[in-house]
Image (spheres, rainbow, N blue to C red):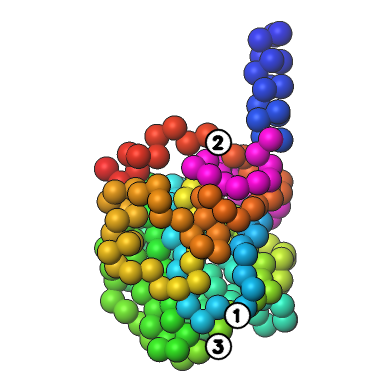
Amino acid sequence: MRKMKTIFLLFVIFHGCFSQGTIGKNIILFPRQTDTDHVILKPTVYRPLKQLTVCLRSFTELSSPHSLFSLATPGSTNDNTFLIYPIPPNVYSVYINQEVIQFKVDPEVLAWKHTCVNWDSVTGLLQLWINGKAYPKRVTKTRSPIGPQMSVILGQEQDSYGGKFNVGQSFVGEICDVNMWDYVLSPAKIAQYFYIYDDDINGNIFGSKNGTYEIRGNANVLRNQFYPFFST
């Protein structure tokens, strides 16, 4: 019993130590479907984003639609300013300024998945990458830059700025390596990130080495001791 108490105490101390700060190479675990568990990202954004790239890795066995990355801006109709929303088994929805673009993708498998989405407001070009594979480019009608004021959430889909979560859209599983750039990442860099797992690749407005976060609810931060093997 004393040993169990010690393990529990160490877990509490560990969780508290990582409840805020930089993500680093840690894994964020969302253990259950809920409308409370989430992580707030705090990217450094000083001006509206005319271009954007978001990359992350995820691991889930969910068969229901769920949010991987939810960015909202102030306003009653700006909850889906930038949203990555898989609909298993073979559809990905990407929202830009409330406009939804759907991609037909390879069927889900139970494995770590590397997702990248980039967008250029000038041309409207939108592209999705999954596990190093590029899906056909699309062109959005909307061309409005994003931000700079924004709420960025992992684990939940925002139906209002910073909240109004729906348990049926929550993420259950693991997320790590969340990176965000204020430019379109090149195909070579995306391939390098997926196949080589280069530690030097880091989002300039949010990344493993910069950008803080806060945990809400029962999401946990775990040390990631096997990240070099995600792409194998």
The image's mark for residue 144 is 3
Q: Position of residue 66 (x, y in %)?
A: 52, 60
The crowd level at tag 1 (other Cα within 10 Å; few <14, some 14-19, many 20+) is some
- Rounded to the nearest angstrom, the CA distance separating label 1 from label 2 is 33 Å
Local SS, label 3? loop
Query: Relative to residue 226, is residue 177 depicted above or below?
Result: below
Q: Is residue 62 in sight in this rendering?
A: no
- Rounded to the nearest angstrom, the CA distance separating label 3 from label 1 is 9 Å
The crowd level at tag 2 (other Cα within 10 Å; few <14, some 14-19, many 20+) is some
- Rounded to the nearest angstrom, the CA distance separating label 3 from label 2 is 37 Å
The crowd level at tag 3 (other Cα within 10 Å; few <14, some 14-19, many 20+) is some
The residue depicted at 70 percent of the width and 28 percent of the height is 13
Please state if 184 lies on the left or on the right of 131 as rendered.
Answer: right
Tell me the residue that label 2 is attached to.
222
The image's mark for residue 48 is 1
- Of the numbered discs 1 and 2, the one sitting upstream in the chain is 1
Q: Amino acid at mark 2?
A: Leu
Q: Amino acid at mark 1?
A: Pro
- Of the numbered discs 3 and 2, the one sitting upstream in the chain is 3
36 and 21: which is toward the camera: 21
Q: Position of residue 142 (x, y in %)?
A: 50, 89
Local SS, label 1? loop
Q: Is residue 34 magenta?
A: yes
Q: Is residue 198 in sight in this rendering?
A: yes
Q: Amino acid at mark 3?
A: Ser
Quadrant where the C terminus sits is top left
The image's mark for residue 180 is none
When asked about the image quadrant of residue 225, the answer is top left
The residue depicted at 71 percent of the width and 77 percent of the height is 74
